[in-house]
C-alpha cells in the first residue's frame, strides 16, 4: 500500500544532490556538511540516465548503491529520481526519430534536457525500463522514502510536431470526437473551408500562412498535456509494481502554466512544486504567495512539498538578482506558512561545469565561509524549531478561479487586444487580497464552492455552460461572486456562447456585454463610483447592457463614457459583481471594500508589507508572520514564537525582514480583525 507522505522526521529539508558530478572523495565532505546544515532529505539521480544505463538494457548501479548506503548511514533520506528528463546520447543515436520537432519544423538537437518526443514508442519503452529497474533494485532500500518521476514536465519542451506525435494526435482526436462530423461541427471547420473527410488528413497545427483554427490549437494544448501525463503514468505504474513509497513529480506553479496542475495533482501521492522568484518583480514575494497557494489548492488543501527553490540568484533569467540577507528564510517560511511541509533547493553543491554553474546552491562556490551557507545552516535550525507546524492545514474563506484550459484558449491569436493578460489580471486581484491580508484558495469553476464566502473570477475567458450554472447556484445560495472583464466569452470549444458575450452568467450578474471596447496602447480612462471616488483604468472597456444589476460605477471618459463600468446584482440570497475594465490593485481597494461587506469578511488590519497566514491542527493555531519591510512592527499575537522560543507576552515585536511562527495560547484565535 502506498504511504501518503515521505517517511521523514521533521519538516523535510535539503535539495537536489548530484554526486555523479564530483569525485568520490567529495561525497564524504558533502554528507558531513549536510548533517551540519540539518539536511534530512536529498533528491538523487534526476539527470543520471547516461550513468545508470550506459548502453541499452545494461545498468550500472554500483555508484548509486554506495551513495544510498552512505546517505542512509548518516541519517539522510532520499527522494530517488527517475532520470527520464535527460535521455542519454545513445538513445538519440539509436532513435533519431524521437527528437522533438518544433511548430516551425525545426528538429531539436542533443545536448540539453527535455528534448524528446513524449509520443515516441521507443522513448516510452525506455522510460518504463529504467524506472522499473530502479524500483526493482531500490524498493526496499531504507534510504528511499519518495520516488521523483522525471523533472518539471512541460519544460523546456512540451509541444512536439514529430510523426509520432501526429499519429498519437489523430488517435486522441478519434477517441474524443468519435466521428469526423462531430469534429468538423465542434471545430467550426466550415470557416475558411477546412472540413475534414479523412482522419489521415488531420495534421498537427504547425505554423501556417495565417492563424490556425483556434479550437484545433486548444485541443492540441490538451493533447500535449495528456501525452505528458501518460508518460508520467507509465513510469509511476512501473515503479508501483515493485515499490510502495509515495510518488511525485515537480510542478512549476510560478513559471509554467502549460500543464493543467488540477489534472496532474490527481496522479501524484504528494504535490511538489519548484518555485523561483521573478527577479524583475520588485515584489516577487507576492508571486511566491500565488504559487504556494496554488500548490496547496491543487493538493486539495493537504500539506505539499517545496521541491526546489534557490538560496540566491538563478542563472536563466535576463538579470539574475541575488537574494538579500534574510530573503532566503522569508521565502522558505512563506511557503511553509501556506502549507508546505518541505523546504528543498536546487541544488546542494554549486556545479563547476555546465549550464547551471552560475545557479546558487546550498553550498555555494564560496564554500562554508559564506553568508549563503551560514543562512542555510540557520534555516535548518529554524525548521527544526518549528517542526510542530508540520501536518497543520491552511483554511481560506475566499477562492480565486484559476483555469489552465481557459488560459490556453485566451493566449491564442487574434483576440480583441494583445494587452489582454490573464496572469496580470490574476496578479492584480490576488495582490489586492494579499494586501488586505486575506488568505485564498484557488479553484476551478466546476468545484464545490459552497464553503467560500467570496469567489473571485479574475480571468475566465472560457467558461462551460455547466460551470456557469455552478457559479450562478453559488450566488443564489448566498455566496458573493466577483467577475472581471473578458470572462464567459466562449465555451470549451472556443465558440462564442449563444446569446453573446457573458451570456451564461447574465442571470447571476444582471448584465451582458454588447461590444468589447479595447483601448489604444497608452490610453487610459477614469471610472467614477456612486460615492464620487475616481478610479484609474486602462487598456479595456465594455459596452454593458444592464438587465437587473445596480450600477456601482460609470465610465467618466473613453469609448464607453457615461456607461456602466462596475455593477452589483442581487441574485437569490447572494450578490454578483462585475468589473468591466482593468483596475490595478490600488484602484481595486475601493471596490473590494464593498465586496467584503457583501461577503461578510473583515480583513485583518496589519501594517503594510507584513504577510500573515494561519495554519491549524491538533487544537493549535500557528500564525506565521513575515515582515517584508526594513522596519520593526508590533503585532497583537499572543503565544510562543517558535523561531526564537520566546513568549510574546501578548504583543509580537517583529524586526524588519524577520519571520515569526507563533503558537497561539487560544486555539480559536486567528488574525485580529478591524
Image: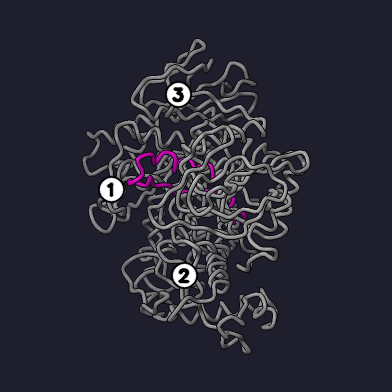
**Secondary structure under the numbered disc 2 in the rendered image:** loop
Is residue 492 in sight in this rendering?
yes
Query: Dot 3 surroundings within 10 Å: few (below 14), some, or many (20 or more)?
Result: some
Q: Which residue is mark 1?
A: 320
Could you tell which of marks 1 and 2 lies nearer the N-terminus?
2
For the point 47% across and 75% down, which residue is it?
211
**Secondary structure under the numbered disc 3 in the rendered image:** loop
**Residue 573 pos. (x, y %):** 77, 38
Would you say residue 146 sits in the magenta stretch? no
Position of the C terminus, as image quadrant, is top right
How far separated are the C-alphas under marks 1 and 2?
27 Å
Would you say residue 278 sits in the magenta stretch? yes
Q: Which residue is mark 3?
A: 607
Is residue 299 in sight in this rendering?
no
Could you tell which of marks 1 and 3 lies nearer the N-terminus?
1
**Residue 565 pos. (x, y %):** 57, 46
How far separated are the C-alphas under marks 3 and 2?
45 Å
For the point 57% across and 84% down, which residue is it?
194
Give the magenta part as a residue range: 266-295
How far separated are the C-alphas under marks 1 and 3?
30 Å
Disc number for residue 159: 2
Could you tell which of marks 3 and 2 lies nearer the N-terminus?
2
Q: Nearer the viewer, residue 351 or 271?
A: 271
**Residue 533 pos. (x, y %):** 52, 34
Query: Dot 2 surroundings within 10 Å: few (below 14), some, or many (20 or more)?
Result: many
Amino acid at each position: 500500500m502506498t504511504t501518503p507522505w515521505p517517511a521523514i522526521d521533521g519538516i523535510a529539508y535539503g535539495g537536489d544532490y548530484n554526486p555523479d558530478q564530483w569525485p568520490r572523495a567529495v561525497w564524504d565532505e558533502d554528507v558531513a556538511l549536510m548533517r551540519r546544515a540539518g539536511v534530512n532529505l536529498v533528491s538523487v539521480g534526476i539527470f543520471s540516465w547516461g550513468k545508470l544505463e550506459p548502453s541499452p538494457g545494461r545498468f550500472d548501479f554500483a555508484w548509486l548503491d554506495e551513495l544510498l548506503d552512505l546517505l542512509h548511514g548518516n541519517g539522510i533520506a532520499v527522494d530517488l529520481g527517475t532520470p527520464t528528463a535527460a535521455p542519454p546520447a545513445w538513445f538519440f543515436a539509436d532513435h533519431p526519430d524521437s527528437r522533438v520537432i518544433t511548430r516551425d519544423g525545426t528538429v531539436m538537437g542533443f545536448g540539453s534536457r527535455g528534448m524528446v518526443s513524449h509520443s515516441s514508442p521507443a522513448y516510452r519503452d525506455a522510460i518504463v525500463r529504467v524506472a522499473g529497474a530502479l524500483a526493482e533494485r531500490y524498493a526496499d532500500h531504507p534510504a528511499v522514502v519518495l520516488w521523483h518521476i522525471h523533472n518539471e514536465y512541460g519544460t523546456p519542451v512540451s509541444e512536439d510536431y514529430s510523426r509520432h506525435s501526429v499519429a498519437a494526435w489523430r488517435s486522441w482526436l478519434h477517441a474524443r470526437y468519435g466521428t469526423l462530423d462531430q469534429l468538423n461541427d465542434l471545430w467550426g471547420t466550415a470557416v475558411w473551408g477546412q472540413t475534414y473527410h479523412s482522419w489521415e488528413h488531420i495534421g498537427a497545427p504547425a505554423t501556417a500562412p495565417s492563424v490556425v483554427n483556434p479550437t484545433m490549437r486548444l485541443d492540441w494544448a490538451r493533447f500535449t498535456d495528456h501525452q505528458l501525463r501518460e508518460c508520467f503514468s507509465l513510469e509511476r505504474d512501473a515503479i508501483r509494481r515493485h515499490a510502495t513509497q509515495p510518488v511525485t513529480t515537480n510542478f512549476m506553479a510560478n513559471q509554467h502554466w502549460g500543464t493543467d496542475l488540477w489534472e496532474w495533482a490527481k496522479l501524484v501521492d504528494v504535490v511538489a512544486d519548484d518555485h523561483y522568484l521573478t527577479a524583475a518583480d520588485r515584489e516577487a514575494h507576492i508571486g511566491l504567495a500565488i504559487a504556494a497557494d496554488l500548490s496547496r489548492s491543487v493538493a486539495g488543501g493537504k500539506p505539499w512539498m517545496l521541491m526546489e527553490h534557490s538560496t540566491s540568484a538563478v542563472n536563466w533569467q535576463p538579470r539574475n538578482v541575488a537574494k538579500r540577507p534574510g530573503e532566503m528564510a522569508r521565502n522558505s517560511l512563506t511557503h511553509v506558512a501556506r502549507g508546505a511541509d518541505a523546504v528543498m533547493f536546487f541544488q546542494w553543491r554549486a556545479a563547476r561545469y555546465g549550464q547551471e554553474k552560475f545557479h546558487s546552491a546550498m553550498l555555494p562556490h564560496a564554500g562554508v565561509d559564506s553568508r549563503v551557507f551560514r543562512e542555510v545552516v540557520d534555516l535548518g535550525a529554524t525548521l527544526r524549531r518549528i517542526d510542530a507546524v508540520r501536518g497543520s492545514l491552511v483554511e481560506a474563506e475566499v477562492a480565486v478561479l484559476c483555469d489552465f484550459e481557459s488560459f490556453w484558449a485566451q493566449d491564442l491569436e487574434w483576440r480583441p487586444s494583445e494587452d489582454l493578460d490573464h496572469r496580470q489580471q490574476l496578479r492584480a486581484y490576488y495582490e489586492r487580497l494579499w494586501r488586505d491580508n486575506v488568505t485564498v484558495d484557488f479553484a476551478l469553476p466546476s468545484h464545490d464552492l459552497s464553503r467560500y464566502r467570496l469567489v473571485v473570477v479574475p480571468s475566465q475567458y472560457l467558461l462551460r455552460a455547466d460551470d456557469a450554472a455552478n457559479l450562478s447556484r453559488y450566488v443564489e445560495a448566498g455566496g458573493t461572486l466577483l467577475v472581471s472583464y473578458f470572462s464567459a466569452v466562449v465555451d470549451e470549444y472556443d465558440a462564442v456562447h449563444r446569446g453573446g458575450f457573458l451570456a451564461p452568467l447574465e442571470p447571476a450578474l444582471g448584465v451582458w456585454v454588447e461590444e468589447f471596447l479595447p483601448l489604444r496602447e497608452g490610453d487610459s480612462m477614469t471610472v467614477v463610483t456612486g460615492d464620487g471616488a475616481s478610479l484609474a483604468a486602462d487598456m479595456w472597456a465594455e459596452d454593458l447592457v444592464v438587465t437587473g444589476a445596480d450600477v456601482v460605477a460609470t465610465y467618466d471618459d473613453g469609448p464607453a463614457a457615461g456607461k456602466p463600468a462596475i455593477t452589483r446584482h442581487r441574485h437569490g440570497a447572494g450578490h454578483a459583481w462585475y468589473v468591466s475594465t482593468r483596475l490595478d490593485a490600488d484602484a481595486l481597494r475601493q471596490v473590494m471594500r464593498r465586496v467584503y461587506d457583501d461577503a461578510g469578511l473583515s480583513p485583518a488590519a496589519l501594517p503594510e508589507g507584513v504577510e500573515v497566514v494561519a495554519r491549524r491542527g491538533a487544537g493549535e493555531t500557528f500564525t506565521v508572520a513575515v515582515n517584508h519591510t526594513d522596519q520593526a512592527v508590533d503585532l497583537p499575537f499572543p503565544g510562543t514564537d517558535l523561531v526564537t522560543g520566546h513568549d510574546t507576552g501578548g504583543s509580537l515585536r517583529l524586526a524588519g525582514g524577520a519571520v515569526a511562527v507563533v503558537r497561539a495560547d487560544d486555539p480559536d484565535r486567528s488574525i485580529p480583525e478591524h
